[in-house]
Amino acid sequence: MTVEEFINEIIRVFKKAGIECPEAEAAQLACHVLSCARSWLYSHKDDEVDDKVLLASAALINERCKGRPLQYVLGTADFCGGTLAVDERVLIPRPETEELVELAVKELSEPVSDSACTAGIAEARKVLGLGPAPYVLDLCTGSGAIAAAVVKELQRSKVVATELSPKAFMLARVNLRPFENVKVLRGDLFEALGSLEEEERKFDAVLTNPPYIPSAEVDRLEKHVKDYEPRMALDGGADGLDIVRRIIADVPKYLKPSGLFLMEIGDDQGAEVLSMALESGAFRQAFIVKDLQGRDRILKARSL
């Protein structure tokens, strides 16, 4: 069987199983088992596929057809240009969370002050290759996706990532082990910071993608989400805002003056979450950022 025939067979099986994007997933699976880039598939479409590869891919194809998400089947997920180890212990990173990272990197790369002096210093540091060196907290890190992406983009940054789930914590440690300037702590939100010195508990930015789906809606999610992804990472309580409320109440204590706070939210939660932030009186500015689909997605705030 040639590479082209191999891919077409996977597409046929995936279509029969009702998989939404069979062509894209077939190419991704083929790249995985052939250990190649996607461009290689098309430049070597007439190459023969080894029987051992065909045998190994059969088990993966079968798992995917049963409904298990492709990322869990392959054991990896792409996020912000990198690759993370993932399995049922952690939520699969979403494109919406990539938007949070992009916003964080943009905000942390620019001076908060509008003064020409500050801007000039920032530009000089950029020219010299120094770049920003923010101290960042990633709450509810899960797979470590946000922390890994931030430290890759802002290489002089220092990141603390926290996670309550012991299973997710172990996987986050695996994904973040390559980064010397990332510390992974286990605990419930800010309680995880208890092992740090007092001066280490003030951050330039706090970033988080907490559970925010109402409990009653979790069981109505698509099968590949509700049956495989960890409920702990999805379920935000009766109205989806249990964890969100706690974070908004406590985060000002852990931000430096004018510190950045970015939190991913549900697309129908913008007005209520913004009201919480404004009514707290702890932020000098707060507003909702829409995602690329035009939906409310991120609370952005600056501390006093």
Image (cartoon, grey):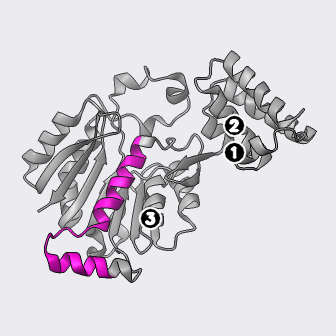
Viewer-side residue, 9 vs 43 = 43
Look at label 1 and name its amino acid. Answer: Arg
Q: Amino acid at mark 2?
A: Ala
Task: Read off the residue under disc 1.
Answer: 38
- The numbered disc on residue 153 is 3
Mark closest to the chain's N terminus, 3 or 1: 1
Residue 61 visible within the image? yes
The image's mark for residue 27 is 2
Residue appearing at x 77%, y 32% in the figure: 7
Q: Quadrant of the C terminus?
A: bottom left
- Distance from disc 3 to disc 1, alpha carbons, whole Å, reads 24 Å
Secondary element type, mark 2: helix
Alpha-carbon span between mark 2 and mark 3? 28 Å
Q: Determine contact: label 2, label 1, CB under 8 Å.
A: yes
Q: Which residue is found at the position 59% from the left and 53% from the top?
A: 83
Q: What secondary structure is marked by label 3?
A: helix
| Magenta segment boundaries in residue numbering | 96-124
Q: Residue 111 occupies which quadrant of the picture?
A: bottom left
